[in-house]
Image (spheres, grey):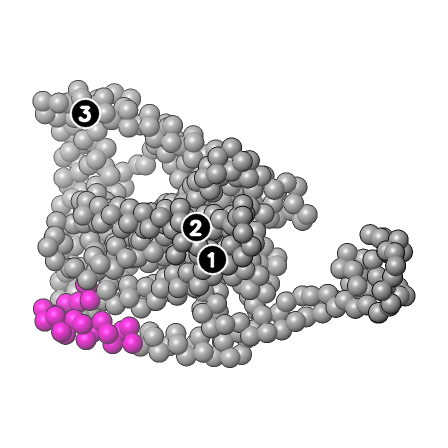
């Protein structure tokens, strides 16, 4: 163990412990009162899933640090004793895929089961998960057998032989080859005719990671593109739409009365849906009405919170209003800082990934210069940009969930989050975290070069048969920038407007 980079190992262990403790803290403070002292298995899955997603994001900076661990070694072979990052990547992402497609669905079916008997709930959840496992297993096996190959583009170089010369004056950078010009031994001067395709079978774990990355990349392109714009702009426009002063008591009574009527309508709608559920008529329109009630309930809670802000009550009313003002100022500051990070991200994608050849390495050079100032400064900035992208993806999913009917809402609220919402969001985070890592490994390829992540995500993934064209033509990057631009235009056009209260709520007939 002494041959390993001891400092890196200690940091990795400490970070993992802190991640687990922080996720337990989130679970305890976000959980709904109805889930206290019960639903232990879903809670374990939530903590494990959040920890795996956080550790996977941190593994890319750790991979870069691991590459640099033997940079200043004083004995030969030091690089053979660093952390086995490639195997750690495969383990963490196989675990990620198992959690997303098997464990989390089982926990959700178990938690939402109607049976009082525990074993019946386990049986029902297992039937769903086993069916899903069979379908996914058959699909993976067929795809792996048919197209699970990697096509690498290589150059076929050759050279003739000659006797060992007494001097090497005949060879130079302009004439590196032996014999006639027909023998091409230089990759720089070889013609395009020397390019060949080298085909080999990918390993099954790498193929599973690749397909999971494709599924996550579709969601990431949409949610991440929307979130990279809506996360900072939402904070800024929240400050713009902030209440400027407290309201009078008569205004408060009027608004509270309207909210009471709306709450009564929603209660009647929920009772009607419960009656339909008991009668067994749970069709497409029933599910549509349930989602409509959930969205209206979330909007009603936002209205109640907004009313409490503009009319603080109790002995500390003035303090409460002062904290509200400070909170909106904090949103403005965070929004401006977030906008700078978002603009930096989009600019980096355009000038480094979409333009060929790249105009500049941009953020790659920034991280390298920060590393030169202090060893972990560039790595910390690198980790921050990766985490920001993941947070933006979750923000985009929340925004679209409130506006699109076909997306199920699972809001995260302090002290009021049910385990099914927790599990859904953890699954989304896990699925998108794979794509965030792949995206960061590509976007920061210059900074993260010669790492295990580059080998998996930069070479194997982008050379897989059938999948490689999505990366060759930058489909996901273009979609990401397009959704970011559309969201920016949307916020500029409509973000400054206050949401108007909806009229009387009615169920679809």
* Above or below, comparing residue 329 to residue 168 in the picture: above
Question: Can residue 119 be found in the magenta stretch?
Answer: yes
Q: In the drawing, does residue 283 fall left or right of residue 178?
A: left
Read off the residue under disc 1: 81
Read off the residue under disc 3: 320
* Quadrant that contains the C terminus: bottom left
Instruction: Say which of marks 2 and 3 sits in front.
Output: 2
Whole-percent x and y of residue 388? Answer: 41, 42
Read off the residue under disc 2: 5
Q: Label 3: state its secondary structure.
A: helix
Q: Is mark 1 in CB contact (under 8 Å) with mark 2?
A: yes
Give the total of numbered labels. Answer: 3
* Quadrant that contains the N terminus: bottom left
Q: What residue range appears in magenta?
A: 110-130
User: Disc 1 versus disc 2: distance between alpha carbons?
Assistant: 8 Å
User: Disc 3 versus disc 1: distance between alpha carbons?
Assistant: 57 Å
Pick the residue in front: 286 or 217. 217
Q: Decide which of tag 2 and tag 3 comes sooner along the chain.
A: 2
Figure quadrant of residue 496? top left
Question: Can residue 374 be found in the magenta stretch?
Answer: no
* Above or below, comparing residue 293 to residue 254 in the picture: below
């Amino acid at each position: 163990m002494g041959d390993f980079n001891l400092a890196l190992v200690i940091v990795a262990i400490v970070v993992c412990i802190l991640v687990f403790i922080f996720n337990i803290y989130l679970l305890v403070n976000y959980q709904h009162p109805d889930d206290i002292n019960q639903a232990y298995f879903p809670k374990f899955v939530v903590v494990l899933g959040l920890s795996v997603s956080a550790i996977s994001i941190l593994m890319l900076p750790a991979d870069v640090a691991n590459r640099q661990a033997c940079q200043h070694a004083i004995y030969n072979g030091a690089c053979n004793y660093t952390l086995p990052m490639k195997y750690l990547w495969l383990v963490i992402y196989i675990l990620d895929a198992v959690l997303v497609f098997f464990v989390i669905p089982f926990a959700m079916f178990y938690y939402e089961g109607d049976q009082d008997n525990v074993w019946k709930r386990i049986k029902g959840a297992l039937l769903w998960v086993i069916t899903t496992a069979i379908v996914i297993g058959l699909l993976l096996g067929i795809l792996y057998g048919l197209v699970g190959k990697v096509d690498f583009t290589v150059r076929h170089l050759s050279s003739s032989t000659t006797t060992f010369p007494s001097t090497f004056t005949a060879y130079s950078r302009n004439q590196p080859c032996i014999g006639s010009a027909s023998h091409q031994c230089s990759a720089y001067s070889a013609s395009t005719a020397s390019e060949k395709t080298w085909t080999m079978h990918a390993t099954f774990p790498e193929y599973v990671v690749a397909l999971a990355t494709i599924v996550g990349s579709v969601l990431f392109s949409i949610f991440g593109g929307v979130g990279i714009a809506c996360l900072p702009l939402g904070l800024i426009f929240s400050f713009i739409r902030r209440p400027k002063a407290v309201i009078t008591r008569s205004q408060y009574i009027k608004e509270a009365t309207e909210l009471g009527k709306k709450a009564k309508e929603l209660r009647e709608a929920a009772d009607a849906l419960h009656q339909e559920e008991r009668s067994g008529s749970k069709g497409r329109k029933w599910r549509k009405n349930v989602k409509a009630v959930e969205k209206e309930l979330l909007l009603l809670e936002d209205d109640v919170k907004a009313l409490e802000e503009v009319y603080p009550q109790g002995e500390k009313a003035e303090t409460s209003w002062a904290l509200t003002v400070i909170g909106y100022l904090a949103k403005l500051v965070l929004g401006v800082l977030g906008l700078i990070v978002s603009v930096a991200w989009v600019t980096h994608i355009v000038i480094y990934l979409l333009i060929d050849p790249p105009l500049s390495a941009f953020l790659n050079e920034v991280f390298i210069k920060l590393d030169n100032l202090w060893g972990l400064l560039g790595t910390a900035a690198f980790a921050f940009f990766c985490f920001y992208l993941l947070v933006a993806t979750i923000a985009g999913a929340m925004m679209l969930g409130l506006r699109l009917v076909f997306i199920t809402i699972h809001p995260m609220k302090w002290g009021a989050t049910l385990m099914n919402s927790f599990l859904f969001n953890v699954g989304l985070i896990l699925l998108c975290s794979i794509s965030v890592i792949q995206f960061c490994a590509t976007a920061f390829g210059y900074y993260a070069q010669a790492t295990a992540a580059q080998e998996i995500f930069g070479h194997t993934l982008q050379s897989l048969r059938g999948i490689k064209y999505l990366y060759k033509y930058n489909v996901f990057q273009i979609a990401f920038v397009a959704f970011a631009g559309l969201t920016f235009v949307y916020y500029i056009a409509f973000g400054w407007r206050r949401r108007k209260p909806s009229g009387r709520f009615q169920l679809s007939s």
